[in-house]
Amino acid sequence: MKFTQFFTITMMMSLTTMINAQQQLNPETEKKIDILMSKMTLEEKVGQMNQYNGFWDVTGPAPVGGTAEQKYENIKKGLVGSMLTVRGVSEVKAVQKIAVEQTRLGIPLIIGFDVIHGYKTLSPIPLAEAASWDLKAIEKSAQIAASEAAASGINWTFGPMMDISRDPRWGRVMEGAGEDPFLGSKIAIARVKGFQGDNTFKSPLRIAATAKHFAGYGFVDGALEYNAAEISTNTLYNQILPPFNAAVDAGIKSVMTSFNTINGIPATADRYLLRDVLKKKWGFLGFVISDWASIKEMIPWGFSKDENEAAKSAVEAGTDMDMEGGIYVPYLIDLVKTGKVKQEHVDDAVRRILRVKFELGLFDDPYRFLDEKREKEIIGSKANREAVLDIAKKSIVLLKNDQNILPLKKSGQNIVVLGSLAESKNSPLGSWRIAADDDTAVSVLEGLQKYKGNSLKYVKGLEITKVEPTFLTEVQYNMTDRSGFEEAKKAAKEADIVVMVLGEHGFSSGEARSRTNIDLPGLQQEFLEEIYKVNSNIVLVLTNGRPLSISWAAEKIPGILECWQLGTETGNAVAEVLYGDYNPSGKLPMTFPRNVGQIPIYYNHYSTGRFMDKDNNVFWSHYSDVDKTPLYPFGYGLSYTTFEYSNLKVNKKSFAKGEKIIVSVDLKNTGKVTGKEVVQLYLHDEFASVVRPVKELKGFELAELKAGETKTITFALTDAELGFYNHQHEFVVEAGTFKVMVGGSSNAGLSMKFEYGN
Ligand code: BGC
């Protein structure tokens, strides 16, 4: 260690035991739980720990709960604490009535559902929303999702997913907030607030949220789903855990385990993570749910010999509820009776589950989420559509705009639109939208057709997929049919501007949609190059659920707009941005690699012992075939205006321990139109007891400036931003020299140094 002086800080985010303001016990509720639990038999307690899937949707292997009749029977026996994917007021009422009116104790069910980016009215996929860096808009989006889900009888969502991932091959990156723990934590908090409101659940339009997948799912080997993860202490504490910790601090009510093993232990049986870190050190008071059958899956993992052992390991580790695994009910009762599992583990789980049910108001009124009138009024309302349109526009990232090909002129142009994704009303809905009806998005084409000033022609040219995929089928890209190319080329030749809508189908990402190649799939690259031969005036509208490697396009195509899958209002949002009625301000929440071989590639990497220039000699840290830099870095995104950064200041050269550091920078809109810019602040600790990343995001602000306007943006840095977790799992702030960098991407332009704690 270069600097002898260092401080171990005890703070909210540290691993010292601490009950935070949002995870406080309410003595009255605890008393009610005591009374209720004193009346419960062991069978009824274990019943609370059992969750069944509903009767139709399946997001994993075949349901175990049996036929609908058997499930109803088990609810009556008090052997079910929760159901998932039952939805709609009348369906939920049917099961809730049984639990409340036909069981001995009348304990209401908690009703869970994957409300990932909306219920029926869909927001952009979560990765896209993260590109907005607009925490208010993200919170609002979760609020809309919560309100529609709640109006449909649901009171608990399996979201937000907060898995940090550096691997765009992993299909589930669409569900998260990207690669960065700082941005990821802020977004996790915004989403928890959006779902849970002020955590009182006085409003029947707020629902309990789930932090998932705990932990390390974004680091599965080879980006292969349901796989193992080998994770260093460094990565676990500094990258993966912070968003979960932040969500707990924000008062989240449940946490879902992940399918993976971490360093050889299935996450569902990871006692250290679940009991020691989550429940004890972070003071989490909600309950832990397994992922779908993840308790049972510990048998094929080779961790548990049989179902009995799997149940024992999971409950001892602190997994409180069994999602569709059918393991707790048949085994736990005997395990407790024979003294193999301590009663206190079951009691702890049941207490936690009941606590959340009390907090949701389900004991006061089990039917409070079940109001047909509200269901009709809220779901799909005009206000909700307006809100998702707003966040959709904010999620778009302008990647390239040579010769200001964008925005499109409003009249006098011949525009041809190519590619079947342009007319798709399904793909823009993205994955994880179980409750939304198919084909309900505004297509890009429909959005463009609202602008009447130009001549607009649509030629499909390429059918992207062979058959329309579903949530339950594999996407098959068209690899052979080029029959539309000639007509498309002819139309492109006559056009002033060619808008090509290419990318991935909405079901290409999400669960079990890992890919080894992240180029434009199928014949799309060939199609793009063929069109380019006849007209290079192309605007590429990308629609995808993960970063793609688009090196050829990045070099040749003048206009590239990253539009992800933007949900119900996709076409309207894309058209407004293409025509300049909305000036794009999105910034990438994940690095775009040049090719798949660079993965994992992320901005907050370490330095190397040989981080030298290529001119020196061949033995430097590089690839022989491809530049080692990303195609587009984290935090990158353009605008229809330009911004200039100047006058970076740190209020002092040297700071004593505990002093606040104030950083300011002037931002000027040097272009011709009003625009928004995400001002990003990165820090680097030059020497430390554990080598520190070359830079880490530690602050950002979304600023709006009129043409010609200058604003001073100010950031305050404290120990929370300066410190890190060391190998002893302690949060430490070491004295030394820090470099602060500020700019419009992770390639931030301005930098300064300051001394801290010396
Ligand atoms: C997924 C979870 C999801 C659950 C319930 C699992 O397959 O991994 O994220 O919440 O299914 O649908």
Image (cartoon, rainbow, N blue to C red):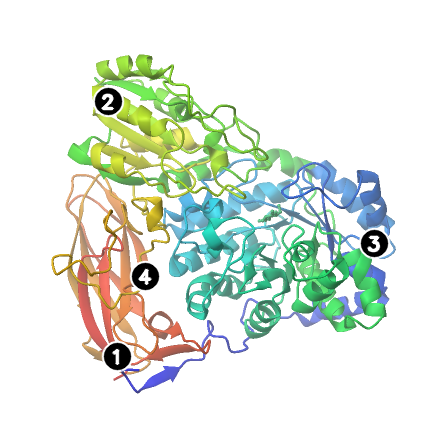
The answer to which image quadrant residue 689 occupies is bottom left
**Does residue 655 appear anywhere in the picture?**
yes
The residue to which callout 1 is attached is 736
As drawn, the residue found furthest toward the bottom would be 4
Element type where label 1 sits in the image? strand
Question: Where is the N terminus found, in terms of image quarters?
Answer: bottom left
Marks 1 and 3, how far apart at CA: 60 Å
Q: Is residue 750 above or below residue 474?
A: below
> Distance of mark 1 from mark 4, alpha carbons?
20 Å
Q: Is residue 254 left or right of residue 422?
A: right
Q: Are marks 1 and 3 in contact (CB under 8 Å)?
A: no
Rendered location of residue 411, percent (x, y):
23, 19
Q: Three-letter amino acid code at disc 1?
A: Gly
- Against 659, residue 745 (above or below) is above
Of mark 1 and mark 4, the one earlier in the sequence is: 4
Give the camera-side residue of 63 and 571.
63
Residue drawn at x 20%, y 61% is: 619
Identify the secondary structure beneath mark 2.
strand
Asked if the residue at label 1 sits under 8 Å from ligand 1, the reply is no
The answer to whether the residue labelled 1 contacts the one labelled 2, judged by CB atoms less than 8 Å apart, is no
Q: Which residue is mark 3?
A: 78
Q: What residue is drawn where x is 22% and y is 65%? A: 610
Look at the picture and state if 499 lies above or below 142.
above
Most extreme residue toward the left, as rendered? 615
- What residue is disc 4 on? 605
Residue 16 rendering spot, x and y as whole percentages: 51, 78
The residue beneath circle 2 is 497
Report x, y in % for residue 116: 53, 45
